[in-house]
Image (cartoon, rainbow, N blue to C red):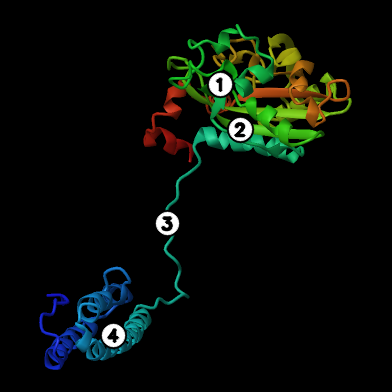
């Protein structure tokens, strides 16, 4: 049983010496049982802790409680106890360290032996696809930027030129954080619907010229089915400089698609509309599965629906209204121009690996994921 400091009723010299002898006997017994450094730390704290250590209790119960005529002798006994405790702790520490070192020596491994190779997993097909796309743009000189998944209405919509009554700002399309009704609209929190807010955040921090690629997770209020998920992944890009044209956009994306899907792939742009770009376009690539023929042998090519083309991303020239929100940081729309693009990494992974249900990517079935290792 661990030693407990008793309250003394008799403070005579004989009584103090008897109590001291009993305490030191308990100290030696506990010190002899120390084998490891954790044991020693527990021993040290039990005897020397400032708040409730044995020495603190001895000082309170024996020295401070002693009557005036017994204080001198009590002080001598307390000083002797303190000295013996410090010595016992030092000896126990050296012994614990020596035992640990000897155990290490006995358990020492032969470092010339081959190591134990731990099996590691493989990249998830969506993450692998994202990394491949990002690497293409990094080779073109783009830097990678990331941002928060929980965004404000300002960064997700307002600063990207979405009008106040745009359908995307409705709860039927966007997942808003609860209890935001009392806040001004631009301060309301939501799960970002695209990675475009990172474009604004980056332009607020970095002056032009700018070339960034933005991979990340986004959320929309879509019921899950074979081609939709309330959570998916996007990769967006932004380039801003003087005299950037739509021709720069077409050349950049044509090169990127050839790097991703093969040098024989062709690209095609058709007009579209996005609030944050003007003019806007949807880019299509010739089907890299059927080679643009629309047929796979005697069967029709399902990914391109026999058209020979696959819609792959949206793009366009940055709308001058977007630059107005970051005009003070060097993005004067009269002096700079830029282009932006965005694609769904999950959709690219579906096409690349021939998967017909996006839900398979997120169900965590190891049997399905193992085939992409």
Q: Is residue 202 left or right of 12 when viewed as pictured?
A: right
Mark nearest the camera among 4 and 2 is 4
Q: Which residue is mark 2?
A: 215
Identify the mark nearer the N-term, 1 or 3. Answer: 3
Please give the name of the residue rendered at 74% of the width and 13% of the height, measured from the top-left corner.
Answer: 280
Q: From mark 1 to mark 3, how far is it between C-alphas?
A: 39 Å
Say whether residue 267 is left or right of residue 118.
right
Provide the secondary structure element on which disc 1 rests: loop
N-terminal-most mark, 3 or 2: 3
Percent across and percent down for residue 260 are 67, 31
In the visual, does 25 lie left or right of 151?
left
Establish if 219 lies above or below 307.
below
Measured Cα–Cα span from mark 2 to mark 1:
13 Å
As measured in the structure, the alpha-carbon distance from the residue carrying label 1 to the one carrying label 4 is 66 Å
Residue lying at 62% horizontally and 18% vertically, measured from the top left = 157
Q: Which mark is residue 118?
A: 3
The residue pinned by badge 1 equals 193
Asked if the residue under mark 2 is in contact with the one under mark 3, i.e. CB atoms within 8 Å, the reply is no
């Amino acid at each position: 049983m661990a030693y407990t400091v008793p309250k003394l009723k008799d403070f005579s010299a004989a009584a103090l010496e008897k109590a001291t002898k009993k305490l030191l006997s308990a100290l030696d017994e506990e010190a002899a049982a120390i084998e490891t450094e954790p044991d020693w730390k527990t021993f040290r704290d039990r005897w020397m802790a400032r708040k409730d250590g044995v020495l603190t209790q001895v000082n309170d119960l024996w020295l401070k409680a002693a009557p005036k005529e017994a204080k001198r002798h009590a002080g001598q006994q307390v000083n002797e106890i303190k000295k013996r405790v410090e010595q016992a702790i030092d000896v126990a520490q050296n012994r614990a360290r020596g035992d640990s070192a000897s155990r290490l020596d006995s358990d020492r491994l032969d470092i010339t032996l081959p190591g134990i190779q731990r099996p590691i997993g493989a990249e998830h097909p969506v993450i692998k696809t994202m990394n491949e796309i990002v690497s293409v743009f990094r080779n073109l000189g783009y830097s990678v930027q990331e941002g928060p998944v929980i965004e404000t209405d300002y960064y997700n919509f307002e600063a990207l030129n979405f009008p106040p009554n745009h359908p995307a700002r409705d709860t039927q399309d966007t997942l808003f954080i609860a209890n935001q009704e009392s806040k001004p609209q631009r301060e309301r929190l939501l799960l970002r619907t695209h990675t475009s807010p990172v474009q604004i955040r980056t332009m607020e921090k970095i002056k032009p010229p700018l070339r960034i690629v933005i991979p990340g997770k986004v959320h929309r209020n879509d019921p899950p089915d074979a081609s939709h998920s309330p959570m998916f992944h996007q990769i967006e890009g932004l380039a801003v400089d003087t005299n950037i044209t739509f021709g720069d956009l077409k050349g950049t994306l044509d090169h990127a698609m050839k790097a991703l899907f093969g040098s024989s792939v062709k690209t095609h742009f058709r007009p579209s509309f996005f609030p944050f770009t003007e003019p806007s376009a949807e880019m299509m690539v010739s089907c890299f599965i059927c080679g643009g023929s629309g047929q796979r042998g005697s069967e029709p090519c399902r990914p391109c629906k026999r058209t020979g083309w696959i819609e792959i991303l949206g793009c366009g020239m940055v709308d001058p209204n977007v630059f107005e929100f970051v005009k003070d940081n060097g993005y004067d729309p009269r002096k700079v121009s830029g282009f932006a693009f965005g694609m769904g990494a999950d959709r690219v992974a579906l096409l690349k690996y021939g998967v017909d249900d996006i839900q398979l990517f997120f169900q965590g079935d190891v049997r399905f994921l193992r085939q992409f290792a």
